[in-house]
Every structure is written in structure tokens, then in C-alpha cells.
Amino acid sequence: MFDIHISCVVFGVNPSLNKRCILSTKAEDIDLPNFKLSVDQASNINQAIIDFLRQYVFVNELELLPQMININSPTLKTEDHILQTVYGFIIDYKSSIDSSKAQWIDFDPLQEHRLSPIIFETMQKLS
């Protein structure tokens, strides 16, 4: 078994510029729980993480926009068998999402936006 810890970062606006965007409903949600992955599953790490995230946001009544997931190749540390993956995604309350129109959101700190307090709080937590 591998231990996988998922870490999130809040920045970035546009996948074509290799930037990531994570909007969390609460700063406390930034660190998702660890989960176990078998050696067989490790060959398809990206799908395992996507499946885990879908279950996580379903249980917490959030909506994950799967097409927005941007997962880096995992790093395998053979000495302690840990896969650590950093990725980007957008989550929000289910009622406010039309996933067919999902897009990356430009965050301009000079413009007022309903998610500004969340973004500032999360960035402060991570800095």
C-alpha cells in the first residue's frame, strides 16, 4: 500500500498558462485527508485521485468540476513508498454550478468578487 497525501495550492487562473486555480468553500478544506492506494492502483494514480475527489466532494455536498482538474505527475519516493501529488481544481456549492459552463476564473484582487474573501483567507493560510 502507498500513503497518498493531497496538498492544495491557491493561485493561478489559466491552464494554458500552466497556472492552477483552487477555490475552496473554507480555508480549512485546503488539506484533504490521506487515503490508501494499492500497488495495482498506483499505475493509474490520476484516475484514483479523481475518483477520490469526486467521492470527497459528494460526501461534503460540494461540486468538483472534473474537467478543471490539472494533476502533475506523481513523485514516488521509493524509500518510504509515498506518492505526493499537487493538483488544481475548482469546487463550489452544488446549487451554484453549471458544470457545462465551467471555466477558470481570473482573480483580480482589485475587483470585488464573491469568492475574494475565501481566496484571501486561503492564500493567507498557505503563505
Image (spheres, helix red, strand yellow):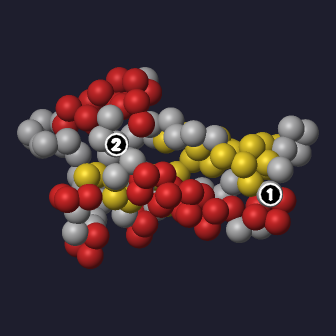
Q: Is residue 116 left or right of residue 55?
A: left
Q: Quadrant of residue 113?
A: top left
Q: Secondary structure at mark 1?
A: loop
- The structure residue drawn at horizontal position 82% and vertical position 66%, both measured from the top left corner, is 40
Q: Is residue 82 left or right of residue 113?
A: right
- The structure residue drawn at horizontal position 20% and vertical position 42%, both measured from the top left corner, is 115
Q: Amino acid at mark 1?
A: Ser
Judging by the rendered image, the residue that carries numbered circle 1 is 38
Return the residue found at the far bottom: 100
Q: In the rendered view of the protein, which quadrant contains the C terminus?
A: top left
Compared with 10, 73 (above or below) is: below
Q: Is residue 117 visible?
A: yes
Q: Amino acid at mark 2?
A: Ser
Query: Where residue 63 is drawn, which disc sits there?
Result: none
Disc 2 versus disc 1: nearer the observer:
1
Q: CA distance from mark 2 to mark 1?
A: 28 Å
Judging by the rendered image, the residue that carries numbered circle 2 is 24
